[in-house]
Image (cartoon, rainbow, N blue to C red):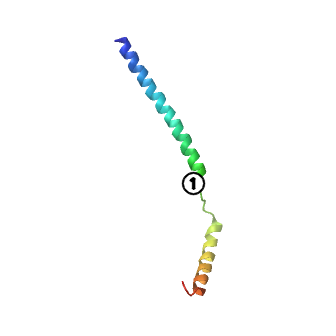
Amino acid sequence: MVVVEAIKLEREKIKVDMASMVDDVVDVFLRNYMKNNIFHAHYTESTSLLIPDLQQQLYLKMKDDKKA
């Protein structure tokens, strides 16, 4: 009976170890993916001042373009 308990404990330990390794690998993968593939944009006040100017430029361009 002692051997059976030892095997069960060893299996549980292996499960915990594997879960820990998977957690670490997934965490590293996701951090690298986000660092390399996700564009982070931050709102600034200067952007809000720029938008009306861009809208005006677009309006003038479309007004002058007969196809639009």
The image quarter in which residue 60 lies: bottom right
Q: Indicate whether 17 appears above or below 33.
A: above
- Residue at 36%, 15% (x, y): give it: 4
Percent across and percent down for residue 41 are 60, 59
Q: Quadrant of the C terminus?
A: bottom right
- Residue at 43%, 20% (x, y): give it: 10
Q: Residue furthest left?
A: 1
- Residue type for callout 1: Ile
- Residue at 56%, 49% (x, y): give it: 34
User: Looking at the image, which is closer to me, 44 or 6?
Assistant: 6
Percent across and percent down for residue 30 are 54, 45
The image quarter in which residue 51 lies: bottom right
Figure label count: 1
Q: Which residue bears the numbered disc 1?
A: 38
Q: Quadrant of the N terminus?
A: top left
Q: Secondary structure at mark 1?
A: loop
Percent across and percent down for residue 9 are 41, 20
User: Looking at the image, which is closer to me, 53 or 14?
Assistant: 14
- Residue at 63%, 66% (x, y): give it: 45
Q: Indicate whether 59 appears above or below 32.
A: below
Which class describes the residues within 10 Å of circle 1: few (<14), some (14-19), or many (20+)? few
Q: Residue furthest right?
A: 46
Q: Residue furthest top?
A: 2
Q: Indicate whether 60 appears above or below 24.
A: below
Percent across and percent down for residue 67 are 54, 85
